[in-house]
């Protein structure tokens, strides 16, 4: 099983600031089958990024993903009020599919 | 518009059973794999089960293998999860999530979830 470890656990920032979230995999993710989800409080997860760097439909270009192999990054260029949420990394290249423990982006 | 609506969550005693349903609309259901993912209270996401569009391939997480059964009815645009031998650690919100294609593992749309509570 591929274990995904996210850092930091919590990021305290203000609107307009940039955010960098990291995710490290315990082994290489097959074919870069790696994504990021956003989960706002009380809501379902929303797909932001797939295949490490492709934005999902309707996702603003302030969200970007990068990385390959075992190290991946989600960057939010300028935080909007609706971006304060929990973000999960996810690998779907090997079974079982696994998620990171989440990074909470909170209002400073 | 893609919509996924889960139902069937309830309070059940340890050792009990429950059947969850997920009704889909807004897309050609048989063209997409479907998944169940759960989230324990205040915790992260755990993938539970997967079924291809034709039901030819089914996968389970080790934590539920032998106790949970996924199935689908393409005529009713629905996917189901039968939960047997329930344990306290199965308490969670259960989400259904659509795969991007018939056999794809990437999940693009999720329902709002249904709460399963296992307690005496």
Image (cartoon, coloured by chain):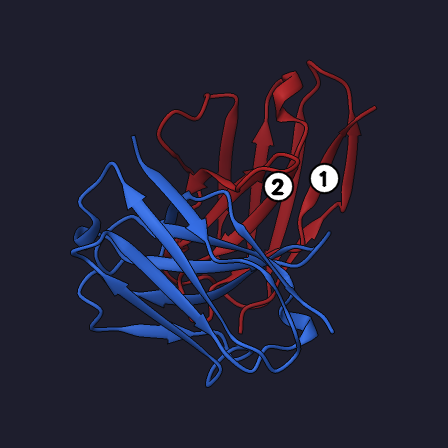
Q: Chain B's shade in the image?
A: blue
- The residue wearing badge 2 is A87
Q: Are marks 1 and 2 in contact (CB under 8 Å)?
A: yes
State whether residue A108 is above or below residue B97: above
Give the chain of mark 1: A
- What residue is shown with label 1? A104
Query: Who's the residue at 72% across and 70% down the image?
Result: B119
Report whether residue A94 is seen: no
Left/right placement of residue A76 relative to residue B61 reads right
**Residue B110 disc label:** none
Tint applied to chain A in the drawing: red
At a point 27% along the width and 40% down the height, the residue shown is B25
Mark 1 element type: strand
Closest to the observer: B48 or B88? Answer: B88
Q: Which residue is at 38% across, 24% downward?
A: A58
In the displayed orientation, state which residue is furthest to the right. Answer: A108
């Amino acid at each position: 099983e591929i274990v995904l470890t996210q850092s930091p656990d919590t990021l305290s920032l203000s609107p307009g600031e940039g955010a960098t979230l990291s995710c490290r995999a315990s082994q290489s993710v097959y074919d870069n089958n790696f994504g990021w989800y956003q989960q706002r409080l009380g809501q379902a997860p929303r797909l932001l990024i797939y295949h490490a760097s492709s934005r999902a439909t309707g996702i603003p270009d302030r969200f970007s993903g990068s990385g390959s192999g075992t190290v991946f990054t989600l960057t939010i260029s300028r935080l909007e009020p609706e971006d304060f949420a929990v973000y999960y990394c996810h690998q779907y290249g090997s079974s079982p599919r696994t998620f990171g423990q989440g990074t909470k982006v909170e209002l400073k | 518009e893609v919509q996924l609506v889960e139902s069937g969550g309830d309070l059940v005693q340890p050792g009990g059973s429950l059947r969850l349903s997920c009704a889909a609309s807004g897309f050609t259901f048989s063209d997409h794999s479907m998944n169940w993912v759960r989230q324990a209270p205040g915790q992260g996401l755990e993938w539970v089960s997967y079924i291809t569009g034709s039901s030819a391939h089914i996968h389970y997480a080790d934590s539920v293998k032998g106790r949970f059964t996924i199935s689908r009815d393409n005529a009713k645009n629905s996917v189901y999860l039968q939960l047997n031998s329930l344990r306290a650690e199965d308490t969670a919100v259960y989400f259904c999530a659509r795969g991007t294609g018939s056999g794809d593992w990437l999940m693009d749309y999720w329902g709002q979830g249904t709460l399963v509570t296992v307690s005496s």
